[in-house]
Image (spheres, rainbow, N blue to C red):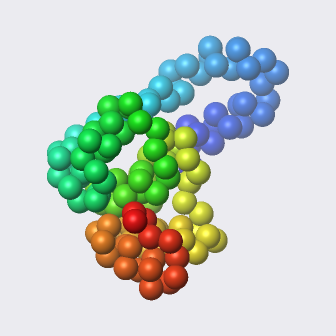
Amino acid sequence: MGVITDKLGADLKQQKDIHTFLENNKDKLLDMNLPKYLDELLAQKNLTKSDVIKKSGLPVTYAYKIFSGQKHTARNRILALAIAMQLSIDETNHLLNHAEHSSLYPRNPWDTIIMYALQRHLSVIETNILLTDAKASPLLE
């Protein structure tokens, strides 16, 4: 975690009133939903939605609904987008948090394979092969 995040956590432990804490720290708290974060990632990485969707293996209409916020989707589909965007593990965990899913957990064998794929910039297809070889459920059916 970053310095700001650590300080916020420490301040929160000391705070007696949540409303005061929120008011005093509103400039440090994130106000970003999933579509905003996806758009930010696309801009940072100079990617297009259509390329990411194609690489993700997700149905086009469904994927566009994720990007627009019309669809709350399963964790594995968010991970397919992360792999297609070649995100880092930290970026992927932020994406999962914005999508209201749990972060990748290195002690979970399935998550470990996903982390391995992210670190090596593997494709969704290559990731599915690794998962299948490990007798784990694939990223996408």
State whether residue 14 is above or below residue 96: above
Tell me if 16 is positioned left or right of 88 in this view.
right
What percent of the width, then of the height, locates residue 98?
48, 39
Quadrant placement of the C terminus: bottom left
- For the view shown, which residue lies furthest in the bottom direction? 133
x 59%, y 51%: residue = 102
- Say whether residue 59 is visible: yes
In this rendering, would 108 be left or right of 27? right
Which is more toward the observer, 99 or 1?
99
Q: Is residue 27 above or below residue 84?
A: above
Q: Residue at x 33, y 36 (%)?
A: 65
Q: Position of residue 66 (x, y in %)?
A: 36, 39
**Residue at the outermost right position:** 16
Is residue 137 toward the left or the right of residue 108 in the image?
left
Q: Position of residue 22 (x, y in %)?
A: 64, 19
> Can residue 38 be seen?
no
In the displayed structure, 14 sits above or below 58; it is above
Query: Which of 93 and 21 lies nearest the eye of the viewer?
Result: 93
Q: Residue at x 41, y 36 (%)?
A: 71
Quarter location, residue 123: bottom left
**Residue 132, x across and y down, in percent:** 44, 80
Count of numbered circles on the image? 0
Q: Quadrant of residue 18?
A: top right
Residue at 50%, 83% in the rendered image: 134
In the depicted structure, whether residue 132 falls above or below residue 85: below
